[in-house]
Image (cartoon, helix red, strand yellow):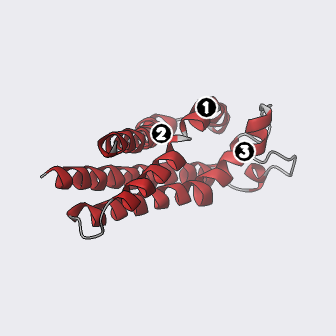
Amino acid sequence: MFQFLQVFTLVLVASTLSFSLAHVGEWPGKLRLNRDDYFTTQTIYYPGFTIGGISEPVAILSLIALVVSTRWQSPAFGWLLAALASMIVMHLVFWLVTQPVNKIWLRDQELAEAGTAFFNQKKKPDPAKSVDWTKLRDRWEYSHAARALFALLGLIFLGIAITSQSA
């Protein structure tokens, strides 16, 4: 059962990395877009990336389960804590940096009930009109690069932890 939890957690962490890397991979092309095309493009991520995003909190919970299941004297314990910390920081970057911009991108979109609740859609003055849209774009894009870095670190640390237990 422990080995299943390790592999399951590895898949979840890799999944979170894949979503953030997808954003990073399209970044250079999106920099060529004008404001209207960029805003149109931003709406394509809902609901797919929102649904895929469930892997983040589940990965964190799974990492917590691995940490709790591992003796603190084990060589894997510190690596698991590092993986957990990386994934928590990745998730915090989403809520503190990415999500506020997501709300702006989806401000005028008709969303399903769950999407409306997740993005806290309430009609407010459009902050994108009072702020240089390129600053919002850069904040969003850089946040995904940071998230990809933390997810990569989490995957590396988890891989080291798993292989140190089998050595």
Q: Is residue 61 above or below residue 105?
A: below
The vertical placement of 115 against 44, above or below, is below
Percent across and percent down for residue 134 are 60, 50
Q: Which mark is residue 118?
A: 3
* Label 1 or label 2, whichever comes before in sequence order: 2
Q: Position of residue 133 (x, y in %)?
A: 66, 49
Q: Residues within 10 Å of mark 2 (few under 14, many from 20)?
A: many
Measure how far apart labels 3 and 1 are at the Cα level. 20 Å
Residue 30 left/right relative to 113:
left
**Residue at image point 59% right, 30% down:** 48
Total labels drawn: 3
Horizontal arrangement in the rendering, residue 40 relative to residue 20 (left or right): right
Pick whichever, 103 or 66, lies toward us.
66
Residue 99: percent from left, percent from top? 64, 51
Classed neighbour count for the residue bearing mark 1: other residues with Cα under 10 Å, few (<14), some (14–19), many (≥20): few
Residue assigned mark 1: 41
Q: Residue at x 16, y 49 (%)?
A: 166
Q: Quadrant of residue 87?
A: bottom left
- For mark 2, what is the residue? 23
Where disc 2 sits, the SS reads helix
Task: Quote the CA–CA distance across marks 2 and 3.
Answer: 20 Å
Q: Which of the two discs, 2 and 3, labels the residue nearer the N terminus?
A: 2
